[in-house]
Structures are given as structure tokens and as C-alpha cells.
Amino acid sequence: MLSTLARAATRRPLTVIGLWTAFLLLGFGLGTGVFADLSDDVPDVPGTESDMADDYLSGVDPTGESVTAVVAGEPVSDAALRAQVERTVAEIRRIAGVAQVPDPYTTPGLTARDGRALVLPVTFEGGLSDEAEEEATDSAVETIKRIDAPDVHVSGGELLGRQLGERAQEDVKNAELISLPVVLALLLVVFGGLRAAALPLVIAVSGIAGAFLGLFAFSQVTDISVYAIQVTTMLGLGLAIDYALLMLVRFREERRHTESTEDLVEAVHRTVDAAGRTVLFSGLTVAVSLTGLLVFPSVFLRSMGLAVAAVVVVDMLAAVTLLPALLTKFGGRIRPSKARSQDEEGRVFARLARFAQRRRIAVLATVVPALLLLALPVTGMRIAIGDARQLPSSTEAWQLFDTVDAHFPKGTGVSPVIVVLKPGTDSATGDRIRALVPNSESRELPGGNTVVELQPPGSVDGKAATGLVEQVRDVRGDEPVEVTGVAARLVDFRAMLADRAPWAALTVLAGIFVLLFAFTGSVLIPLRTIATTLLSLGAALGVVVWVFQDGHGAGLGGEGLGALSLTAPPLIVSIAFGLAMDYELFILARMRESRQRTGDDHEAVVTGLRRSGRVVTCAALLLAVVFGAFMTGGFSPILQIGLGLTLAVLIDATVVRMLLVPATMALLGRYAWWAPGPLRRVHDRFGLRETAAAEPSVTTKV
């Protein structure tokens, strides 16, 4: 298949380049439409009680979405301000689609005790079309913004999704403006020439276009989280650079033996045949790592898994089709690698490999406990939905939250636990539920339904709120009572993760094992790879918990959020696991070549690191630059994911691949490549592998 793709790309390079150009225009044209349709509603899980209750409630409740405004900065008793607010309330009530707007001066709890702020909630009618709701929202916001006060902030509901989408688009643009020049500068250092350095960026741009187009396609059938934009874009950008780097390094090696145009085309074929197989398996391992997300019924996790997998496929295809076409047209102007003797090539990595082999027990006794120590905070990890503190301080939602927090009692504005008492519910059960918190509010709905709103103390996802959900579910017994609201969705989301996580892990590990066996023909190397990868992954996640949950590292985690975003751990684990496989395959590919050529297990490890160590290190550094650029945006979940992936990549590419890999391979010795007879025969027939290359008389420098 790879040979066919390579020959098609080299026979008709302009056609391939033209098709990819059309794809880029489509991605940056149609695909960017996803920014207008983003959601901040992550924890919904279809089929759970909270989700079914919410669906039921939306069908019987005549009211719909709402937005909230806060007016602050001067005494609200000021006659001129009061006249403005009352006039604004009257105007909003006349807007088509608005269900209710309470007067903040006569409604208890809407005016701050310090007299310097008031809250103005606006609730819209249920069943509005998207266009009608958007028009009503815009009219209400425009009216509120005309209030002449130092601080006027509006957010919530459909408006929040739009605000976050605009900020996400700005963050992605800024991250690209930061990362691409830095990446180009690093590539110039690696390759020593502008042409070779520019090609990975062309593939990277393809990855970004693929991210936009994939997310836009999924947005037509499901909600797309605002956080999906940054995650898919930074991964698409990083992986594209990784794959292009690997291919270009191999091409420059093959380029040393070319003199004519025919030789150049053949060099491209050999590049795709050798490095392209590694790219193919790398893409497959990342995609398989993401299949674990499909095990979860969460719409968010499933859509993220599918979207990121689609981006990986685009990057992989660009590396084995677009890049060969570009090399065919412009590869003659790319200088070949500089010739170096075998003793000079990758000396540092060869020395590390030999050191780890000789001192394998000492290396394992030092590195493994150190990584386990870094992973220790994971044992106390908590996940939560979080509040506006997870958003950048420049967002309207954060400013509204901060203003309310400064003027109103703690817990003001916290979403209540919503209890739906369906027809047939015993009145005594309803009374016991209302008695769980003081000042509970009830309202009757058509059809004999009653909604009870229980205001929990503390945060929306704190122990008090989630504990209140459990209390209601204990009290109701067998009565037709359902619980929903933000806290209930969090409880159900956590239960879903606990129930499906073992199956997700089993799916991913089994898939990775099969792919690594197909690549190596060994059953022990996949087990060794999985074990060492889990160490680096645990260490990275432990640091994220230590920083963001516990509040260490003021530059990132601040005072500590008390929990990680519920989006962060599953995405860090699935994506980082796939990225770690990238570097493992880069090294194993070179090891296999050496072992096939010489039959020396010991020297194959040294040669593998000697010839791939620089590529792995450069790839990890470039990926860290990309992740770091996306961490400038300020969304706390993105900061958590970015830090986790950066640490996982750097730890894996340095400590694990440069020390643990040679140490464990030396410990296994000749059994490292062992497989039972039946499996060996299966691999001989169906397994895919790197083509063994002839040992060059002189080796090359990246």
C-alpha cells in the first residue's frame, strides 16, 4: 500500500499537491465554521439519570435557556442607575422570546448586601428555534450593555458558548503565531536549510486544516466542546511535524546516493517504504490509543476520540502522500545529510545506551522509584466540572463570576440540584426531599410535575453538592423522582468513568499489544513498552495533580482548584499513551534494521538509539514547543492537558527511551524478541516490518 501511494505521489506530484491545496482551502474555509458552534457543556452522558431527567424536564418546562447579567461599581440605590435598570427590565420583557425578567430591586437575593452590585437574570421561552433564541439573546444583551455603570457583564446559556468560541479562535491563532516561527527556527537548526525546514510546516498546516474540517463535520451531528479546538489543533500540528521530521531525516540519508532525477524519485520511494512504515504504525498506535475514549458513553469523550483520530489520519496521509510529492518536485534542492563515521554519529545516545546496558539494575533501581514518586499524587486525584476560574480572566464569564464573588455571599449563583417529582410521587417523600436544605424552592409544571430546587452550600461540584445528590437518591426510594443539574451530571460522569475505565484500558492495551507485535514479532517488547510508558504517563499526570489540584507552581496552578477538570485525565492518558508509542516505534524501527542486518541483539539496541536518538529528541522538543504555545491561552483544562502532554513527551523521550529502554532490553537479552512458535508463524505471514537497509559505509547526521 505504501509503495503504491509513494509511486502515485511521485508520478503525479502536481496533482497530489493540487488535491491537498483544495483540502487546505476547504479546511480553512468551511472548517473554521466550527468556532460558531461550540459548547461548554461537557459532562452530559446519554442514558444516565441526570441526562434523562434533563430531557424530560425540557419537554414539560415552558422555560428555556437563560443568561445572567451583573451590574456593579457604584451604589445600586443611585436614582439614575435604578431608573436605567428598571427601564432595561421593561425593555427586555418586551423582547420576543423572553419568558421572564425579575426586578432585582424587589426580588430577594438579587441585590448585594454591600449595595454596590445587582444581578439581573433573563430567562427565555422553551422550544425556541436556534435563530429565534440567538436573536432574543442578542437583543437582551444589547439592551443590558446600554446600562451606564463601571462594570456590566453578561454571560451564560447560549451566549457563553459563543463567547468561549470567540476566545478559542483567538487562542488558536495566537498559539499558531507563537509556535510556527519557533518551530521553523528549530527546524533550521536541525536541517541547516530553509527548504527542508519549511516542508514540515507545510504538513503541519495540513494537520491544522484537518483538525478544523474534522471538528466541523462532527459538529453537524453532535456538540463539540470548546476545549476540542485547542486539543485537536495542537495535536494535529505536533504530530504532523513529528512525522515530517522522521520522513525528512530518512530522505536526507537516502539523498546521499542520488545523482539524477530517477535516483531522486527512487530515494523518495525508499524513504516512504522505510520511514513511511514507521509513520503508518505510529499513526495507528495513536488512533488505537484513542479508541479507549469510544468505550465511554460520554458524547464529549467519544467526539474527542473520533475527532483526534481523524486528525491523526490526516497527518499520516499528508506525510506519506503530500510530502513525497513535494520531495519529488523540490527534493533535489535539499542537501543530503553530512557524512560522519559510525563512531561520531549519535555518540551521546550510544554512550547512554551502553551505560544503561552495563548498569541496568542501577538504572532501574533509580529511575523507576523516581517516576513512581512523581506519580504518587495521582492516588489523591479528583475530577470536577469547575467554575469560571478555569476560564481566562479576560472572558466575560470569568469577569461576571469574579464580580458576583466580590459582592455576594459565597455560593451565590451556584446551580441548584434539580429534583423532578413526577406524577404519583408520595407527598411525604417530597417533603423529606425539601427538608434536606433550608429555603428550597418549588414550582409546579404542566402535567402534575413538580420541580424542587435545592441550593447546595459551597461550589457547584463540591462535596456538599454531590453529597446532596446522593442524599436525594437515597431518600426517594422507589418513588418516581429524578435528579438532574450540574452536580448530578458530575456524579453520573464520575460513575461512568469508574465503570468504563477498566474496559477502555483493556481495549487500548490489547490494541497496542497487537500493533507492536505486528511491528516487532515479539510478545515481550510490547509488554515492556506498555510498562515503561505507564511509568512516564503516571509521572506526568502526578505533576499535573500536584500543580493544578494541590496548588503548587504559582505560575500555572495558582492557589489550587481542588480538582482537575473532568476533561483532562482521560485525554492526557489516551493522547500521551499514543504519543509515547511514536517515539518507541522510531527507536524500534532502527533496532530492527540493525538486528536484521547483524543478528547482534546487544548492538542493535545501541545502534537503534544512536540512529534515532537525535530524531526522537528533536521531535519531543518540537512537540513541547507546540504544546507550550497552546498553554498561553489561559483555559485551565487546556493548561492541564498541555502540561500533562508536555511532561509525558519529555519524560518519555529522555528518561524512558534513553535509559529505561536500553536497560530493560539488556535485562531481557536475546529473549526480548521472543515469541511462541504459533505467533512467530503468524507474524512471518502477516506482520509488517521495516525493510532492512544495507549498512552504509559512512553514517549520517540529522
Image (cartoon, rainbow, N blue to C red):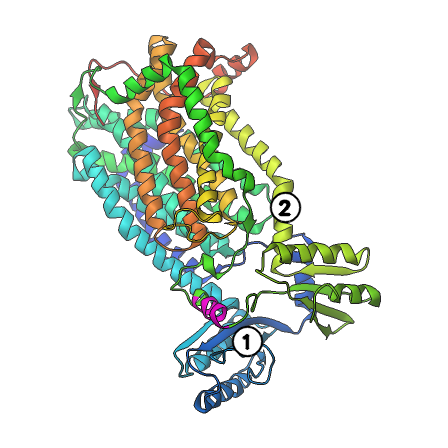
Q: Is residue 403 magenta?
A: yes
Pair 2/1: label in front: 1
Image position, residue 79 (x, y; %): 46, 91
What amino acid is found at the position of numbered circle 2 in the picture?
Met
Residue wearing tag 2: 496
> What label does residue 235 carry, if any?
none
Write the residue at 34% across / 20% down. 590
Residue wearing tag 1: 121
Left or right of 490, for residue 274: left
Is label 2 in a helix, a strand or a loop?
helix
Write the residue at 62% across / 54% down. 463
Q: Is residue 304 magenta?
A: no
Disc 2 + disc 1, Cβ < 8 Å: no
Q: Name the quadrant containing residue 74.
A: bottom left
Q: Quadrant for the C terminus, please.
A: top left
Residue 434 versus residue 242: which sits nearer the camera?
Answer: 434
Q: Disc 2 versus disc 1: distance between alpha carbons?
A: 33 Å
Residue 659 versus residue 372: which sits nearer the camera?
Answer: 372
Image position, residue 110 (x, y; %): 56, 78
Q: Earlier in the sequence, mark 2 or mark 1?
A: 1
Q: Main secondary structure of the magenta part?
A: helix
Picture layout, residue 464 above or below residue 96: above
Write the residue at 38% across / 25% down. 657
Is label 1 in a helix, a strand or a loop?
strand
Picture layout, residue 198 above or below residue 596: below
Image position, residue 544 (x, y; %): 45, 43
Left or right of 604, for residue 122: right
Q: Quadrant for the N terminus, please.
A: top left
Image position, residue 433 (x, y; %): 75, 63
What amino acid is found at the position of numbered circle 1 in the picture?
Pro
Magenta region: 399-407
Mark 2 nearby-residue class (10 Å; few <14, some 14–19, many ≥20)? some
